[in-house]
Amino acid sequence: MGSWAEQFPLLFRDYLRCHIDECELYAAVKYELMKKYQKDRHGYVDAKEPIIWDIMRRASSWSQEVWLEGWRNRCVKSKNRSE
């Protein structure tokens, strides 16, 4: 299972891989923040926190749904997955 510190990035990655619209949203937010905080790395990291936690809340719910159905088919059942 691993620790939360190990699970967090894997869940975040898997969720974004299966939810292309969320991935695009995250990329757009990161791009805007990059422009805003070009010379402030800490400001950039802090400003990303709300979107990361919003995504992780949805990812956590999603993981509970797909876990019950079988993790191997996780992207097949995802509503937002582009074909």
Image (cartoon, rainbow, N blue to C red):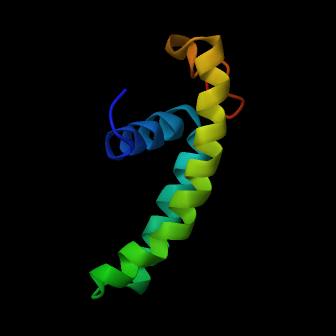
**Viewer-side residue, 67 vs 37:** 67
Residue sitting at x 46%, y 37%: 11
**Viewer-side residue, 37 vs 70:** 70
* Position in image of residue 78 (x %, y %): 66, 27
Residue 54 relative to residue 34: left or right: right
Q: Is residue 46 visible?
A: yes
Residue sitting at x 64%, y 33%: 62
**Viewer-side residue, 70 vs 4:** 4
* Position in image of residue 83 (x %, y %): 61, 24
Q: Is residue 63 above or below residue 68?
A: below
**Viewer-side residue, 56 vs 4:** 4
Residue sitting at x 58%, y 30%: 63
Q: Is residue 34 visible?
A: no
Residue located farthest toward the right when viewing the structure as drawn: 79
Image quadrant for the N terminus?
top left
Q: Is residue 81 above or below residue 60?
A: above
Residue sitting at x 33%, y 32%: 2
* Position in image of residue 24 (x %, y %): 54, 51
Q: Quadrant of residue 39?
A: bottom left
